[in-house]
C-alpha cells in the first residue's frame, strides 16, 4: 500500500472502522501472530530511541512531566491528548 492512498482515506474522513476495513482489503495479508508481534513492537517503541527525533521528543515529553527515556511514543501521545482535551474543556 502506498502512503498517498492511506493519507487519502484519512483526508476523506474515514473513521476507525472504515480504516480497518480498508486496510484489511488493501493491505498485505498478515497472520494473527504477525499482527500481534507488530502491535507489541509499536506499543513499546519510543521516539527517544531515534537519534534524529530524540531532542524533539524529550522536549515534548518533559513539558508533560514525563521522563523521555522511560516514555513510549504511545504513552506520550495519550498524555498529550488528555492534556489537550482538558485544556479545551476548561
Image (cartoon, grey):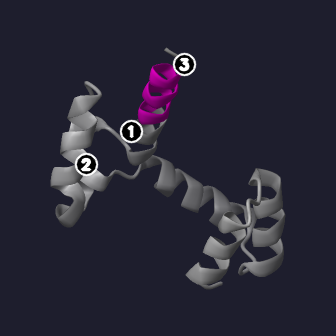
**Residue lying furthest top:** 90
Residue at coordinates 20% horizontally, 44% vertically from top-left? 58
**Label 1 to label 2: alpha-carbon separation:** 9 Å
Determine the CA span between mark 3 and mark 2: 25 Å
**Is residue 71 positioned above or below 65 on the image?**
below
Identify residue for label 2. Answer: 57
Residue appearing at x 25%, y 24% in the figure = 65
Binning the other alpha carbons within 10 Å of mark 2 as few (below 14), some (14 to 19) or many (20 upward) gives many
Quadrant housing the N terminus: bottom right
Q: Give the residues in magenta.
A: 79-89
Please name the residue that numbered disc 3 is placed on.
89
Magenta stretch containing residue 87, yes or no? Answer: yes
Q: Which residue is mark 1?
A: 76
72 drawn magenta: no
Secondary element at image label 3: helix
Q: Is residue 40 visible?
A: yes
* Label located before the other in sequence (3 or 2): 2
42 vs 32, left or right, is left
Quadrant housing residue 31: bottom right
List x then y, in percent, for residue 80. 41, 34
Front residue (pair 48, 60): 60
Q: Is residue 90 or residue 23 the one in the foreground?
A: 90
Contact between marks 3 and 2 (CB within 8 A): the answer is no
Q: Position of residue 12 (x, y in %)?
A: 73, 66
Cα separation between marks 3 and 1 = 20 Å
On the image, the x and y values in percent for residue 42 come to: 49, 55
Dot label at residue 10: none
Q: Are marks 3 and 1 in contact (CB under 8 Å)?
A: no
Amino acid at each position: 500500500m502506498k502512503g498517498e492512498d492511506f493519507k487519502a482515506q484519512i483526508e476523506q474522513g474515514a473513521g476507525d472502522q472504515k480504516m480497518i476495513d480498508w486496510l484489511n482489503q488493501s493491505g498485505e495479508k498478515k497472520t494473527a501472530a504477525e499482527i500481534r508481534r507488530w502491535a507489541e513492537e509499536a506499543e513499546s517503541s519510543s521516539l527517544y530511541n531515534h537519534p534524529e527525533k530524540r531532542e524533539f521528543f524529550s522536549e515534548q515529553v518533559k513539558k508533560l512531566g514525563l521522563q523521555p527515556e522511560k516514555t513510549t511514543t504511545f504513552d506520550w501521545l495519550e498524555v498529550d491528548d488528555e492534556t489537550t482535551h482538558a485544556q479545551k474543556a476548561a
